[in-house]
Amino acid sequence: MKKLIGLILVALVLTSCQKQKIAYVDNGVLINEIKEKLDIEAKYTIKDSLFKIKVDSFRQVFQADYQKIAALSKSKQESELQLLNQKAQGLQQAWQIEQQGFQKEYQVEIDSLISKVKTFVQDYGKSNGYDYILGTVEASPSVMYSKEENNISQQIKEALDAAYSK
């Protein structure tokens, strides 16, 4: 009986001393450097550029219209100027709404990507036998020190990029 209790105690001591597998990732690397995020940014940069071109072309038209109004008589100038200003205000409001729509779309895609990355890291941790994967950012680091081999940011970034490429 004493031998059985002794064996159980030894087994408990050995299992409690097992080393846990812990790693960390730099959240900034995972979110900002993965290919999918770069593609999202590129898509919205193009949308923004096209939007700016459209706005600039309308501004040029308005400048030409203002110059035409300057050549009119004083009485006609006021009424034409008022109409042109109303039209400009309407377009500015439409542009603001369009731009806010882009910003909302972008934010939804980024939020979705962040959620996807979190799920990916959880799955990666489970499939690679990690007990913990900590996240840290440069602005407020939660990992103050770790051996460099515990930083798996690059491996997860590469795995995310590979999954995105499929």
Image: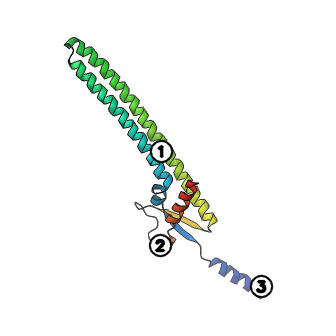
Compare marks 1 and 2 and give the one earlier in the sequence. Answer: 1
Nearer to the camera, 127 or 21:
127
Q: Amino acid at mark 2?
A: Glu
State which quarter of the image contains the N terminus: bottom right
Residue under pointer 2: 148
Q: Amino acid at mark 3?
A: Leu
Badge number at residue 78: none
Residue under pointer 3: 4
- Disc 1/disc 2 C-alpha distance (Å): 33 Å
- Disc 1/disc 3 C-alpha distance (Å): 61 Å
**Tag count in the figure?**
3
Q: Residue at x 45, y 39 (%)?
A: 102
Residue under pointer 1: 107
Tell me the mark number nearer the camera, choosing from 3 and 2: 2
Q: Quadrant of residue 166?
A: bottom right
Compare marks 3 and 2 and give the one earlier in the sequence. Answer: 3
- Image coloring type: rainbow
- Disc 3/disc 2 C-alpha distance (Å): 43 Å
The spot of residue 54 in percent (x, y) is: 37, 33
Q: Residue at x 56, y 58 (%)?
A: 162
Compared to 37, does 104 lie above or below?
Answer: above
Describe the element under mark 1 as helix, strand or loop: helix
Q: Residue at x 41, y 36 (%)?
A: 99
Q: Residue at x 39, y 36 (%)?
A: 51
Q: Amino acid at mark 1?
A: Gln
Q: Dot 2, how many residues are within 10 Å of its Cα: few (below 14), some (14-19), or many (20+)?
A: few
Compare marks 1 and 3 and give the one earlier in the sequence. Answer: 3
